Image (cartoon, helix red, strand yellow):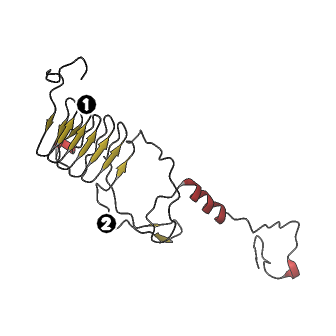
Amino acid sequence: LTGYEIKWRDYNNATADHIGITVGTKGQSGNAGIAIGTGADSKNRIAGALNGVNTSGADNTSVTNAIAIGTGAKANRDNSVALGGGSTTDKAGTKQTGYTLPTGVTATWSGGNSTLEGDIVSFGAEGFERQLKNVAPGEVSATSTDAINGSQLAAIADQIALKYVSINSTDVPNKDNTGAKANNSIAIG
């Protein structure tokens, strides 16, 4: 450090446990943990923290395989990732295997059977959400677990929009008086 001694008490207070790596003042790393940046805290087993973040669970409990990047980011669940300043993994991952539409039709999808509470990547926090930008189109299939971008959703919405039926009951008579004969009825085909 130019102009300062590394032994000065304000700068020499980083700690690292067994095979842990800590770079930066007031940083802490646990067993096999990595903490980079002032105040970075990865004191849990096999955790990573960059730039003043925390990978502790509630009440400072231990988490495993968590990564937090950004000032004030907190990955507090096993296997969770918090990206960006102030990001948290407070909301648990949940198993999602399908959805029942209001019409009663059930849609099912792949990849949600084994989701655990910590199987999440957070880009913000409640009330401080972020958008995920520059996502390439993902595979669209019955077994795909890729992310889908907005252009893919727009293309599907364009295809399912009702464009091929036009009925004007006052200008066009009932052809051959067959089909729809009752009031407010429609016959197509």
Q: Position of residue 79 (x, y in %)?
A: 27, 54
Q: Nearer the viewer, mark 2 or mark 1?
A: 1
Residue at image location 78% in from the left, 76% down from the top: 182
Q: What secondary structure is found at the residue carrying circle 2?
A: loop
Q: Position of residue 91 (x, y in %)?
A: 33, 49
As shown in the figure, which amino acid type bears the numbered disc 1? Thr
Q: In screen coordinates, is 182 left or right of 24?
A: right
Reading the image, the residue beneath label 1 is: 38
Residue appearing at x 43%, y 42% in the figure: 129
Q: Nearer the viewer, residue 5 or 152?
A: 5
In this view, the residue farthest toward the top is 3
- Cα distance, mark 2 to mark 1? 36 Å
Q: For residue 6, which quarter of the picture?
A: top left
Q: Disc 2 or 1, which lies upstream in sequence?
A: 1
Q: Quadrant of the N terminus?
A: top left
Q: Residues within 10 Å of mark 1 (few under 14, many from 20)?
A: many
- 28 over 169 or under it: above or below: above
Tell me the residue at 86%/78% (across/down): 175
Query: Which amino acid, by three-letter code, is at mark 2?
Result: Ser
The residue singled out by tag 2 in the image is 114
Q: Position of residue 13 (x, y in %)?
A: 15, 28
